Image (tube, rainbow, N blue to C red):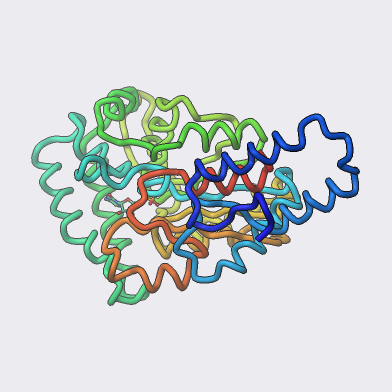
Amino acid sequence: MEEGEVSGAENGGNERKVVKNRKRKSNRGQNSDSDSEKGRHQLKRRKKCEIPELSNLRDRERVEQILTSMRNAGPNTLQVISDFDMTLTRFSFNGKRCPTSYNILEHSKLISEDCKAKLKNLLDTYYPIEIDSTRSVEEKLPLMVEWWTKAHELLVQQKIIKDDLALAVRESEAMLREGYQQFFDHLHQLSVPLLIFSAGVGDVLEEVIRQAGVFHPNVKVFSNYMDFDESGVLRAFKGELIHIYNKREGALLNTEHFKELQSRCNVLLLGDSLGDLNMADGVMDLENILKIGYLNDKVDERRESYLNSYDIVLEKDETMDVPNAILRYITGQ
Ligand SMILES: Nc1ccn([C@@H]2O[C@H](COP(=O)(O)O)[C@@H](O)[C@H]2O)c(=O)n1
């Protein structure tokens, strides 16, 4: 390892800073550094990927190669594709589960007690199936469609008023992951598109992002949207149902949108389920893709399949520290 260079998880962020500062100080006021020497030094540093936050990688070399390619190509070639619930939002806080966009409605005053009980019953029935690593996708898919369809039917019966959604979100316990501000702001500052593919409720999740003050113009959401009548009362859900296993179809249907992003051939993908892995399928001329998976629940049972599918697996990590560190590295900031 080159002097002054730190890599891998064995080094804490502070040590890294100290080493970097030391290096900068020793160079100060010296004119002997030739440009070519500097260039060589920079190149060496660029070849080695210095992200102390990186751990739990099955193939570190591959990850480093992807990151180096992405960094060399620059932020203008990058797009970020992310899931929402339990990926951009926290899974738990102080030992308590945080709500998904559906749960925000379910726990709100917009829903009758009777409906709450029915939705809770659906959650208790179908969520264990969603995260059951012993069942195949083929087995789970129809059951997921059943869950989403039943939940939508119940929600529509509640005659939810559009203007009440903001209060429901404000009064909820939904939280974006720690470090979200830096994540959203960084992408905004560099005009990197952030595409959110969610099987949640679009109107609700947009409100979560809006209230957090990070719904910047570079953020685009593809999700299940509510259809309100002229008096603002929920009457249906718009378009095709999006559930956890058809995000690929959603991505392919949105190729028109991806076309606008044609020059963005590098993708950073964030997800929390194996269904999220296909979210970038509509991207044309894809050159590099780095997949980061949050493994929130049933960690031991699902570790193997996540490590086999995601490049980086984040176990019970409630922060955006790794995506932020990767973005800083790729964008050279
Ligand atoms: N009635 C429902 C249906 C689904 N969920 C959860 O929402 C998540 C989907 O959102 P993503 O942003 O992650 O695509 C999904 O994982 C389900 O667990 C729910 O809470 N209630």
Q: Residue at x 90, y 43 (%)?
A: 35
Give the image location of residue 74, x and y in percent.
74, 47
Q: Residue at x 72, y 53 (%)?
A: 46
Give the vertical position of 141 relative to 314 (above or below).
Answer: below
Locate the N terminus and report the quarter of the image it occupies: bottom right
Give the image location of residue 208, x and y in percent.
38, 32
Give the vertical position of 204 relative to 253 (above or below).
Answer: above
Q: Is 227 placed left or right of 71 in the picture?
A: left
Locate the C terminus and report the quarter of the image it occupies: top right
Say which quarter of the image contains residue 168: top left
Residue 254 appears in the rendering:
no
Nearer to the camera, 162 or 218: 218
Q: Is 160 placed left or right of 7 in the picture?
A: left
Q: Residue at x 43, y 32 (%)?
A: 209
Q: Is 261 placed left or right of 279 in the picture?
A: right
Residue 201 appears in the rendering:
yes
Give the image location of residue 108, x and y in percent.
20, 32
Q: Is 291 placed left or right of 238 in the picture?
A: right
Give the image location of residue 156, x and y in percent.
26, 41
Nearer to the camera, 220 or 39: 39
